[in-house]
Amino acid sequence: MPGPKNLDPSSSPRALLGAELRFAREQAGLSQEELGAPLFVSGSFIGQLEAGTRRMHLEYARQMDEILGTGGFFVRNCMAAAKSKLAEHFVEAAEAEADATTIKEYAPQLIPGLLQTEAYARAVFRAYHPTAPDTVIEGHVTARLERARLLSDPTTPMLWTVLDEAVLRRRVGGASVMTEALRHVADLIRSNRVIVQVMPFVAGAHACLDGSLKLMTFTDAPPLAYAEGVSVGKLLDDPATVNRNELTYDLLSASALSPQDSLAVIESAVEEYADEDQA
């Protein structure tokens, strides 16, 4: 595993907890593997906590306070850091996403969150929560747009997305919303900020028919995969599992249209929705 990253404890709650965890572990004279053993986690998992790429869950915080004799420090700070506008099952993945140097994602149904427009996100959340008050929906939309600010950096993270053709054809919010949403994706492609490929229906069976896929790499921590279902999600750090998912993404990309042909398909869909909206 790469050497420890020098964290700025003021940069985020995870950075604070990671820096303090490393300090307390070293003070106790324990290696990452030795601290991980009684928690039934790997040394690399402890390293990810220290690097700030993994979120510390409360059950681990309790055990670390006991093992390291930190007087409840990790429990108190873990509880304070746990408050988030994001869905509980996605918080850890979003925090890892914010530290990633590369993000590769296969989207089978919807435009990925980092690429969504405000109107598109609002339509998605209203579909998820048809009876929720508007204030709840707007809270979800705000959190999603805050995530998308990752792309305000001109180079990092490198975002590479494969969109199933179903994403282009699914009429989320109607013609005007789809026009704006797909035009936004096309603009990001043309500005060389993201790489996007389209998996066309005519490609038939492909390597990721059974769900979505997200892979993240980091400067100072091992890569992660993220698996998600309805109201559930889990970060995966087992090297063999991550390697299998990386191969799946490679096969997926090889079956998709080239970035140039994909842009043409996306812009054609923009024109179709725009024409419909003006009719």
Image: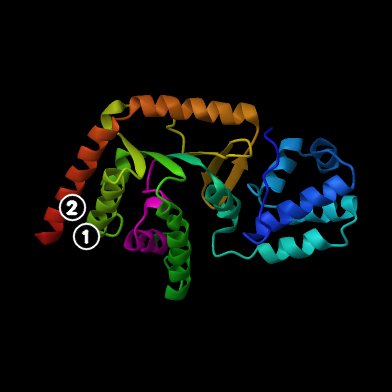
Residue indicated by mark 1: 176
Percent position (x, y) of residue 108? Answer: 39, 41
Q: Is residue 172 above or below residue 79?
A: above
Q: Nearer the viewer, residue 74 or 191?
A: 191
Q: Which residues are magenta?
A: 108-126
The stretch drawn in magenta includes residue 114: yes
Percent position (x, y) of residue 65? Answer: 85, 56
Crowding at mark 2 (Cα within 10 Å: few <14, some 14-19, many 20+): many
Specify the amino acid type for callout 1: Ser
On the image, which quarter does residue 47 sit in?
A: top right
On the image, which quarter does residue 234 sit in?
A: top right
Element under label 1? helix
Q: Residue at x 26, y 59 (%)?
A: 177
Element under label 2? helix
Q: Could you tell whether 5 is left or right of 195 in the image? A: right
Q: Residue at x 65, y 48 (%)?
A: 54
